[in-house]
Amino acid sequence: MKFSALFCLAALFAVSVSAAEKPNVLILYADDLGFGDLSIQNPKSKIPTPNLDQLAKEGMRFTDGHSSSGICTPSRYALLTGRHHWRDFYGIVNAFGDSPFKPERLTLPEMMKARGYNTAAIGKWHLGWNWDAIKKPEAKPVGEGRKRTWGPEAFDWTQSIPNGPLDHGFDYYFGDTVINFPPYCWIENDKVVKAPDVLMDTAKWKPIKEGNWECRPGPMTSDWDPYQNIPTTTAKGVEYIKSHAKSDKPFFLYFAFPSPHAPIIPNDKFDGKTEAGPYGDFVFETDDACGQLLAALNEAGIAENTIVIFSADNGPEKYAYKRDQNFDHWSSEPFRGLKRDTYEGGHHVPFIIKWPGLPNAGTVSDALVSQIDIMATLASSLDFELPDDAAEDSHNLLPLIKGDVEKVRESHVHNTKESSFAIRKGEWILISGKTGYVSGRNKDWEEKRNYPADNKADVELYHFTADPGQKNDVAADHPEKVNEMKALLTQIREQGYSAPRLAK
């Protein structure tokens, strides 16, 4: 059934909720942020995060929150569909790649539109566009090998770019799609604001402050400045909040940061604000931007009628190993693993929800939750009946948020690539494979943290409550638990859903 038909059914049969009763929704989504970076949940953090700490004090902080993947595109897809990404794909959308959304797939913003919301996405997209639609028929790639790309002359930049945010439920978009992918220019709605006229050249930019630029070659506007990403998108977010505050329709704003993803480029006024180097300063700048957006809600008089959700797409990048060595700050604290890994550090991320009327502000919950659950939770709050072919893995967290129950989820599946899965059930975690590393081991870090040598077994099993750092593989001691977890993983993968509402 196409989503347009679903909208009609929802309008006819769902219980109506008046506009005045509908809360605005603001999702703040960080990029490559570690669980241990937030000072409120890591006493050893060298990074002050005052605005996010305050958000946690006003809302509910989940200590066991997860993304679907250890990399960018899949986690965003899962959040915006309520469906595990690995049911459809595994990797990221590459430069000039098309969208992974199928036309019939109901998305979170489409659902919100069906319930009368204005919808907007600002910041990082990384969910593809149909760039071929504006590519000139005679276009030829330039460069060789890893530098092979398309030049600015390859595209008709005056045309609308289809299959982007506006084709999947958003009324408005502003951003640069991906900070380290071409084209390096601002995009508003479905057109570039200014046409690229040169090839990307990092020599034109201020020096990078940590790590590498990691920018893929491609067309760029000659005045492009990546340091202006956070200031520009934040200003757009503040403008959007204030301009829609008095609308007769509530808004749903998905604000996706480019940070602290590489390139690590905090603006000068944030230099030295932390004790974790430029990365720490970049996290601090991200926290500051969150503060500006939250302040806009207060200034507009709508903070008490706005749901705010903060999380991150995956754990921190590989530079975290050197950061731990140089600054004694482990971004994944207290977990093992980083971005891409199926160990906890790859997907166990900050997760905060501030909900209007929350009974106990400052609540800390250790319940297992997932970003995939946001869709079913908002659907429940808006009396939207999800069809069977939508949000197949999304659990309704509303009873948990209201304090009616202590847990909603029993299990969750983690994945980055086709051959690397992990499953959590209750207190147990099974790594389906010889290791939970995807990006590779760092033996110096393991030695510092007293990790044993790899036993090269076919699976790994950990008791999460007793061993959150995943140091002690107990698979050999619990073969029956290994078999139980493997069977559950197979069941969830093969049955095509894990949402309780779909269980017959």
Image (cartoon, rainbow, N blue to C red):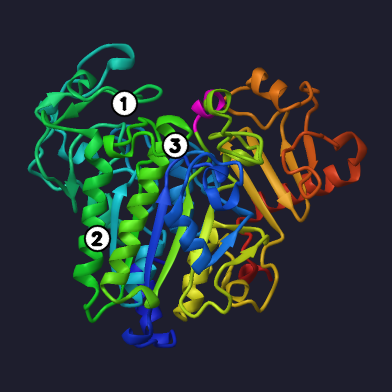
Q: Nearer the viewer, residue 42 or 459?
A: 42
Mark closest to the chain's N terminus, 3 or 2: 2
Dot 1: element = loop
- Residue 305 lies, with reference to residue 343, above or below; the image says below
**Magenta region, main secondary structure:** helix
Crowd rating for badge 2 (residues with CA inside 10 Å; few <14, some 14–19, many 20+): some
Which residue does the numbered mark 3 point to in the structure image? 280
Mark closest to the chain's N terminus, 3 or 1: 1
Inspect this view and state whether residue 260 appears. no
Q: Nearer the viewer, residue 375 or 45?
A: 45
Tell me what residue is drawn at x 7 percent, y 43 percent.
158
Circle number at residue 238: 2
Tell me what residue is drawn at x 69 percent, y 67 percent.
407
Tell me what residue is drawn at x 9 percent, y 28 percent.
197
Residue 344: % across, % down: 64, 41
Based on the picture, tell me whether residue 394 belongs to the magenta stretch.
Answer: no
Q: Which residues are magenta?
A: 317-322
Residue type, numbered disc 3:
Gly
Dot 3: element = helix
**What is the quadrant of residue 403 in the picture?**
bottom right
Residue 371: % across, % down: 52, 56
Residue type, numbered disc 2:
Val
1 vs 2, front mark: 2
- Residue 19 lies, with reference to residue 365, above or below; the image says below
Residue 136: % across, % down: 12, 32
Real-space CA distance between mark 3 and mark 2, rounded to the nearest whole angstrom: 24 Å
Mark closest to the chain's N terminus, 1 or 2: 1
* Count of numbered tags: 3
